[in-house]
Image (cartoon, coloured by chain):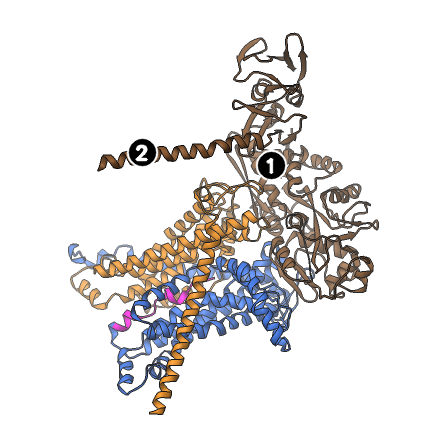
């Protein structure tokens, strides 16, 4: 009986340790969010969100162009990376054992491990140096390169989750492989695909180095995709290390906007998936 | 129910509008009385003995100030109480208290008449300015009246097409350049957008060599090897301003103005002197009570022009530094040092760590009210860093300035000179490939440097203006910029 | 859905579709290949100049143009291992709590919060580390360590707030969500029948965890730890802001150091020629280290996920999704 008690006590103690670590982790992470919120909220108002940065010493100024630049470049990156990544995933799903599939899988894995600065450098070398100018277009492409492996990996995984019985049924009914993929497998996997895409979007939206090397930064509105463009992470990095208190203040404001946007995107995606699963 | 709700909401709307109005009124009154109006002519401030006033939404200025600024002759006829101005044959007459004025005999209605206030004759600014062919703008946020002369606007080739210059480089002059390009766009050339990205001198140099930048900023001039990568004399170095690097410290009980000699500074950074009460420091500061405290050396972690100027100076004054460490934007620091990111990072680290010493650019030191050391210069005087002492450093070296203006300003021989100062340059190609961009580049540099429009902004941010001799050289350099052999400068 | 479409001749219905998907796969190969080529091409001059000595020397001197990777590699490894030592136990404990112990109403929202935090950009962690953690650490825990354990070389002062330990802390915060989320997934994949069998044998809840859950998911959890390690190795911006950036092998955990990624971030803006090339060579090195860690991790995670006896459909449903394996990159 005594041993049982001891066993129970040890168990409770260790369980308590787990509870404690969970509390600590959640607390620490929530503290970061709270702190960003507290420091950033003071800087945020409508003019801050929609106006251009002002020169040093002039009051006001905002992150309007960085917000638009980030949104456009991430959108451009998604536009390129999503069809690309999903197409590659479909290939991997349809031809899982070919040599090309094995090589692509390996290459994709390699791509996820490439430091983001190096991806920026790559796009800089092949695009910016070639054309002679920094552009939002190059920034979008660099972000696409960052997003492709994430989307491909998650999409392949999600396609695999579609039960084989469904595929066989479709093929048995005389549908072509293409029809099966487009009409059946993709719709069935949409929920998972969206989550993967959202993660890729969040990853792209937070990138500093690849964007700085390709789109540079700008203090003006983006008029066309061939121009340099501002972006939120670059602005945060530059302003955080500036000696001007109002710029540091704006760095916190921009950080809050960035984090809030990414979190909202993620929550939306998760809710979308929950909603879909419920409907099915 | 519905009806009631509507009337309620409209009632609230009215109430809110009233509240806003009420809260705005005193504010408007305050801005008029509190905020002095300043006048800028072609980007430079003008000071009169009577400040401008606003009456009925119109700015009135002392007549002499505006007429003389615009280069017109001005006369006062006591019997007819008439102000008359004459510029290049154009005659303007204003009668005190009359709402009608004449320009070359033609009558023009005025919203506010000329008037006498405290014994001074005040005339409506916009009317006079525009009648004499200048452009007048009112910046309500900063209470500045901006006047642009016809000469300025006529000389500038108006660029019809919107044009954007992609430039970037040194971080050090970035705050100044952000203000300059905004001002340039506002005053002289609204079609031209100059976008300067603060990415570091090295990235600036790489950008100009790869032609991804239309022009580039740098704190470290090109080396001979870099110059060799392009045709000889192809890249011009245009100095814009000078900056000082202040030595700052945090020693308990010690205020600003600690005296330091070059050899002591080098030995602190070499790790030879490790405590604040070292005999060599106390000997220089007999009246300061220096504590027995460990010296923590703080330096920039990111590669930077500030580090270049500082290590350039140490290399100049210490053979051992020159041999063991050398000058560069990032060096191999001897001993244990603390790296901090950016000037702000160094300033923060120095104020956080008791016993710390660090180097930051002057504006950071002044803004952060940091302790600044007096450094003994070549002439043997202990000098506190300041804009004037920085200018003095350049004045002492103008004669030795090489043709291509690649030179170091550290350890200047001038008696008043602060020894740790450096130039910052704009790099631009002599042979330009795009005519519109070439025009905009030359015009901007001419406006900013040669016509000295950068000076008021530089002063605000504690950069020192270039001495006269250097500006002449800049002018000569800019005149060599050409497009297919055609000079751009007019 | 396919039934609504008129089934046409399957052979000809394919069109260019298979080619299109294959082209996408080939493009990924080409992309990866050309990135490697560009980096190799950029790093080549440095490799030519230093050869293998680059990996065995510890001088980093931009003035003399002498470059050695040891301090940066050492700093990278020590900070990442430190982060792992801090975040590993906490993350696994949290994962056990979230999957085994927490009341059902708490499981979902808490897990969700942890996963969300994996998406917070690293520049934001850096901002927080620099302005909040470092100043607090200098006077709080740092000073405490210096005062009480300063006799150990490991905790020799002065406590500066920035340095190896602070960088390790920031990295730990960043990889916690990754480790927790993946470990939780791996633990959840342990079949329910095994747990019930243990309870039937009269075990306490903890004994069930210790004897069944943990051994079964051991390899997967190791994979989660390695993925966390992979993320911290490549982390640049956040580490740069708090590590103190000294190109030396740090004498103590409170001293400043440098990592590969932070060195690249610090010197890239002003680098030229050989220095630039040396930075790229470092990048290549980092990339090889990260890749190796990632490959081992993915292999381990897959092995557990596949090695558990369970019904096929069920396993599919609980299989690890890469979004959890990937974290937020660099």
Instruction: Name the one closer to the observer, A212 or B246.
Output: B246
Query: Does the magenta segment cover residue C329?
Result: yes
Colour assigned to chain B in the rendering is brown
Instruction: Name the one closer to the observer, B387 or B156.
Output: B387
Q: Can residue A73 be seen?
A: yes
Residue visible at 81% across and 62% down? B280
Q: Please report whichever mark, 2 or 1, sits nearer to the chain's N-terminal start.
A: 2
Colour assigned to chain A in the rendering is orange
Marks 2 and 1 sit apart, C-alpha to C-alpha, by 55 Å
**Residue B10: assigned label:** 2
Q: Secondary structure at mark 1?
A: helix
Figure chain in blue: C
Residue at mark 1: B441
Q: Is residue B156 left or right of residue B477?
A: left
Residue visible at 50% across and 66% down? C171
Is B15 placed above or below B463 here?
above
Q: Is residue B5 left or right of residue C125?
A: left
Is B69 placed above or below C167 here?
above
* Disc 2 versus disc 1: nearer the observer: 2
Is B54 placed above or below C125 here?
above
Query: Does the magenta segment cover residue B241?
Result: no
Q: State which chain disc 2 sits on.
A: B
Quadrant in which the N terminus of chain C is drawn:
bottom left
Q: Can residue C280 be seen?
A: no
Q: State which chain disc 1 sits on.
A: B
The region drawn magenta spans C314-330
Q: Is residue B367 left or right of residue B383?
A: left
């Amino acid at each position: 009986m005594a041993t049982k008690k001891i066993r129970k006590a040890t168990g409770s103690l260790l369980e308590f340790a787990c509870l404690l670590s969970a509390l600590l982790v959640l607390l620490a992470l929530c503290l970061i969010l709270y702190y960003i919120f507290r420091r950033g909220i003071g800087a945020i108002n409508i003019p801050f969100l929609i106006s251009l940065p002002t020169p040093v010493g002039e009051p006001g100024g905002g992150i309007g162009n960085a917000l638009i630049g980030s949104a456009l470049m991430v959108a451009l990156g998604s536009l390129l990376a999503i069809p690309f990544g999903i197409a590659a995933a479909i290939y991997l799903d349809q031809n899982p054992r070919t040599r090309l599939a094995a090589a692509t899988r390996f290459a994709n894995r390699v791509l996820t491990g490439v430091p983001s600065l190096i991806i920026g450098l790559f796009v800089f070398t092949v695009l910016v140096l070639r054309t002679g100018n920094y552009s939002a277009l190059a920034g979008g492409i660099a972000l696409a390169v960052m997003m492709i492996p994430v989307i491909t990996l998650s999409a392949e995984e999600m396609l695999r989750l579609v039960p084989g019985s469904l595929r066989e049924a479709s093929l048995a009914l005389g549908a072509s492989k293409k029809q099966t993929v487009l009409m059946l497998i993709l719709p069935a996997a949409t929920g998972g695909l969206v989550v993967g895409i959202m993660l890729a979007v969040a990853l792209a939206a937070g990138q500093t180095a690849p964007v700085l090397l390709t789109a540079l930064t700008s203090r003006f509105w983006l008029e066309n995709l061939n121009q340099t463009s501002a972006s939120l992470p670059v602005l945060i990095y530059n302003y955080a290390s500036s000696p001007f208190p109002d710029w540091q203040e704006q760095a916190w404001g921009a950080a809050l906007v960035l984090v809030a946007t990414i979190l909202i995107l993620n929550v939306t995606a998760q809710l979308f998936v929950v909603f879909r699963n419920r409907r099915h | 129910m519905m009806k009631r709700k509507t009337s309620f909401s409209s009632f609230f709307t009215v109430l809110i509008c009233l509240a806003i109005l009420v809260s705005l009124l005193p504010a408007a009154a305050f801005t008029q009385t509190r905020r002095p109006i300043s006048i800028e002519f072609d980007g430079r401030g003008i000071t009169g003995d009577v400040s401008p006033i606003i009456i009925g939404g119109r700015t009135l200025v002392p007549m002499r100030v505006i007429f003389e600024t615009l280069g017109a002759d001005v006369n006062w006829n006591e019997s007819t109480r008439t102000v008359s101005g004459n510029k290049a044959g154009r005659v303007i007459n204003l009668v005190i208290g009359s709402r009608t004025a004449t320009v070359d005999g033609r009558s023009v209605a005025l919203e506010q008449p000329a008037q006498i206030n405290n014994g001074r004759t005040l005339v409506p600014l916009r009317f006079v300015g525009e009648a004499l062919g200048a452009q007048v703008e009112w910046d309500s946020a900063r209470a500045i009246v901006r006047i642009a002369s016809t000469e300025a606007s006529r000389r500038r080739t108006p660029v019809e097409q919107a044009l954007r210059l992609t430039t970037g480089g040194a971080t050090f002059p970035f705050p100044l350049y952000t203000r300059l390009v905004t001002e340039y766009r506002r005053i002289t050339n609204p079609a031209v957008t100059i976008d300067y990205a603060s990415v570091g001198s090295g990235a600036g140099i790489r950008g100009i060599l790869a032609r991804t930048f239309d022009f580039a900023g740098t704190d470290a001039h090109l080396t001979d090897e870099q110059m060799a990568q392009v045709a000889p004399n192809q890249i011009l170095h245009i100095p814009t301003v000078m900056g000082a690097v202040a030595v700052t410290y945090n020693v308990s009980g010690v205020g600003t103005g600690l005296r330091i000699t070059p050899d002591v500074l080098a030995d602190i950074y070499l790790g030879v002197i490790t405590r604040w009460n070292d005999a060599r420091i106390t000997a220089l500061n007999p009246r300061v009570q220096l504590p027995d405290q460990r010296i923590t050396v703080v330096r920039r972690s990111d590669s930077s022009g500030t580090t270049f100027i500082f290590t350039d100076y140490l290399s100049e004054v210490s053979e051992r530094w020159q041999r063991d460490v050398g000058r560069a934007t990032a060096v191999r620091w001897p001993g244990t040092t603390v790296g901090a990111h950016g000037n702000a990072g160094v300033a923060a680290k120095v104020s956080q760590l008791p016993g710390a010493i660090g180097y930051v650019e002057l504006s950071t030191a002044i803004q952060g009210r940091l302790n600044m050391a007096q450094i003994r210069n070549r002439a043997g005087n202990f000098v506190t860093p300041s804009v004037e002492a920085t200018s003095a450093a350049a004045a002492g070296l103008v004669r030795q300035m090489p043709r291509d203006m690649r030179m170091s300003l550290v350890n200047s021989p001038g008696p008043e000179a602060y020894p740790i100062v450096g130039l910052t340059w704009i790099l631009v190609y002599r042979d330009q490939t795009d005519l519109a961009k070439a025009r905009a580049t030359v015009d901007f540099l001419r406006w900013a440097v040669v016509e000295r429009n950068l000076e008021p902004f530089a002063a605000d941010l504690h950069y020192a203006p270039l001495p006269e001799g250097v500006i002449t050289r800049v002018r000569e350099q800019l005149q060599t910029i050409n497009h297919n052999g055609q000079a751009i400068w007019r | 859905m396919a039934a609504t479409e008129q089934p046409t001749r399957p052979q000809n219905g394919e069109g260019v579709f298979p080619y299109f998907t294959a082209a996408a796969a080939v493009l990924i190969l080409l992309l990866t290949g050309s990135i490697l080529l560009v980096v190799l091409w950029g790093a080549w001059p440095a490799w030519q100049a230093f050869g293998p000595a680059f990996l065995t020397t510890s001088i980093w001197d931009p003035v003399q143009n002498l470059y050695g990777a040891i301090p940066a590699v050492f700093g990278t490894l020590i900070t990442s291992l430190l982060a792992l030592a801090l975040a590993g136990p906490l993350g696994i404990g949290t994962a056990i709590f979230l999957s085994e112990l927490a009341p059902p109403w708490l499981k979902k929202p808490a897990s969700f919060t942890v996963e969300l935090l994996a998406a917070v950009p690293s520049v934001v962690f850096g901002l927080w580390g620099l302005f909040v953690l470092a100043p607090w650490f200098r006077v709080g825990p740092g000073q405490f360590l210096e005062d009480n354990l300063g006799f150990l070389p490991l905790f020799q002062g002065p406590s500066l707030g920035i340095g190896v330990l602070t960088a390790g802390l920031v990295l730990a915060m960043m990889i916690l969500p990754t480790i927790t989320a993946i470990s939780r997934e791996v633990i959840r994949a342990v079949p329910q029948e095994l747990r019930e069998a243990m309870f039937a044998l009269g075990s306490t809840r903890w004994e069930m965890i210790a004897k069944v859950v943990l051994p079964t998911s051991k390899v997967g959890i190791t994979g989660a730890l390695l993925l966390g390690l992979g993320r911290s190795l490549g982390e640049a911006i956040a580490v740069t802001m708090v590590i103190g950036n000294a190109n030396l092998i740090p004498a103590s955990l409170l001293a400043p150091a440098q990592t590969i990624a932070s060195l690249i971030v610090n010197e890239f803006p002003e680098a030229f020629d050989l220095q630039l090339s040396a930075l790229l060579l470092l990048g290549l090195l980092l990339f090889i280290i990260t890749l190796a860690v990632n490959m081992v991790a993915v292999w381990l995670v897959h092995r557990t996920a596949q090695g558990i006896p369970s019904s096929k459909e069920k396993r599919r449903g609980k299989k690890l999704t890469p979004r959890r394996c990937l974290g937020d990159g660099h």
